[in-house]
Amino acid sequence: MNKRRRPLERLVRTWIACLCMSAVGVVADDATTAPSRLSDEQARLNLESFDHVWTTIRDKHWDPKPGGLDWEAVRGEFRPRVENATTMAESRAAMGEMIERLDQSHFGIIPAEVYEELSLPDGDGTTGIDARVVDGQALVTSVADESPAAVAGVETGWLIVRIGDDEILPRLEKVAEEFAESGYKDLALAGIVMGRLRGKVGDETTVSFVDGEGSEVQRSLTLAPQQGKKVQVGFLPPFHIWIDHETIDGDIGYIAFNMFIDPATLMPTFNRAMKEFMDAEGIVIDLRGNPGGLIGMAMGMAGWLVAEKNLHLGTMYTRENELKIVVFPRPRTYSGPVTILVDGLSGSCSEIFAGGLQDLDRARIFGSRTMGAVLPSAIDKLPNGDGFQYAFANYVSEGGEVLEGTGVVPDTEVVPTRKALLQGRDPVLESAIAWIRAQK
C-alpha cells in the first residue's frame, strides 16, 4: 500500500520556526591546499560573529549559568583566539570549541558553504515529489496525485540523480560527511534534494532519474502551486498547511498532516476525523516529515487518545518558566490501538507527541528514529556568513527522557527500501496496520 503524502514544504526554512538543525563540528580547509589567510575585513566579521554567538548564549540559554560555566571566563578564553586567528578554520575552531563547552547537542556553527548549500530558492512552486535519502541515494518516496510529477509518470522508488545542472550525489556526500554524527542528517540530506525541486510557480525544472529498470530517464516538470492553505506565522516565511484523513484497509483510521501550525485549520479537521474514527479498529497518525510547531496542538490532539486526567507529555523549561505539557482528555476518548509513524524528519512537537504517548503506553511508534530536535531553537546568520543554531528551552519527557540529541526510538523500526517503493508499497504503514490487526 502506498499512501501518497504531499511533498515537504519549505523544509529547511521551517527549521528556524520549530526544530532547526545542529552542525557537529566545522568543515576544515581542504588538506590538499594551503588555508587562505583572512583579510582584515574577514577577521573583523569573524570577531563580530563570535560576539553574537557568545552574547546570544548568555542572554537566551534556559540556564542563567549556561552549561554550569562561568560564561564571562569562557569569553575571556576564546575571544582572543578568534581575534588572533589567521584562517577561517582557526576562527571556526575557536567558536566551535567554545560551544562544545556547553556539552549540549542543539548548539553549533554551520559553515557558510554548508549553510548556503541548505538554502532554498524563493517561490511556492512544487513538482509534487517527496524524497528521502536512503543508503546514500535520493529516492522518490511519494508523488502527489495530479501533480506535475504524477502527470509526467514519475514513480516511487526512482532514484534522483540530477536536478537541472546539479549532480545530486556529490552534494549529498558533502552534507552527509558534515552531519555524519548528527541526528539531523536525514533532514539535511532531504533538504538538499527537496530544495532543488521547488521554485516559482510556472518555472520549469529538468530532473534525471534512474527508473525501476535501471535506465536513466529525464522529465521536464513545470512547477505547480503547492497544495494546502498558505499561512503566515509572525515574522516567519509563509507555510502551506495540509491535513488528510481517510479510512484505510477496511476499517482503520488514517490521519496525516505536515506541521503543528495553524490550529484554526488543522484542529477542526483532526477533531472531525477522531469523531469519525471512534469505532475504528485502530488509528494511524502519520508524522513522517512533520517538523513540529505549536506545543498546544499536541496537547489538544493527545486529549482524544488519553482518558486519564492529570497526565503530561513532558515538561519544557525556559529561564523564566516551567511548562507542563498537559493532556486534557475529551469527554469521549478513543480507546483502541494507536500507532504513530515517524522518520528522521520528524522533529519538535512531532517528537513530543510521539514520545509522550509512547511514555504513557498509549501509542506504538513505527518507522525510524526521529531527529532529536525537541528543543525550540533558531538559526541566525552570522556576519561572516556562517550559521549559528541555538536552543532557548529544555525539554524532559514524562518518562524522564531527554529526547534532545537522541530522538524517539520507534517500538518497531522500519525503513523504506527501493524495492518496496518500486512495488508501490509503504513498509512502515504496512507494519503499523499488521500490528493493529494483531491486537484483536
Image: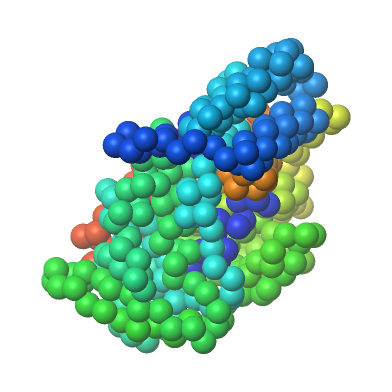
In the rendered view, how is the structure colored?
Answer: rainbow
Question: Can residue 181 be seen here?
Answer: yes
Residue extending furthest toward the front? 40
Q: Is residue 149 left or right of residue 293?
A: left
Residue nearer the viewer, 436 or 300: 300
Residue 235 on image: x %, y %: 78, 60
Q: Is residue 232 left or right of residue 35?
A: right
Residue shown at 34% from the left, 71% from the top: 165
Task: State whether residue 126 is above or below residue 26.
Answer: below
Residue 22 on image: x %, y %: 54, 38
Q: Quadrant of residue 192?
A: bottom left
Quadrant in which the N terminus is drawn: bottom left
Question: Can residue 334 be seen here?
Answer: no
Residue 8 on image: x %, y %: 51, 64
Residue extending furthest toward the right? 320
Q: Quadrant of residue 35?
A: top left
Residue nearer the viewer, 229 or 175: 175
Residue 179 on image: x %, y %: 42, 39
Q: Quadrant of residue 47?
A: top right
Residue shown at 63% from the left, 70% from the top: 240
Residue shown at 28% from the left, 73% from the top: 208
Residue shown at 75% from the left, 39% from the top: 326
Number of callouts: 0
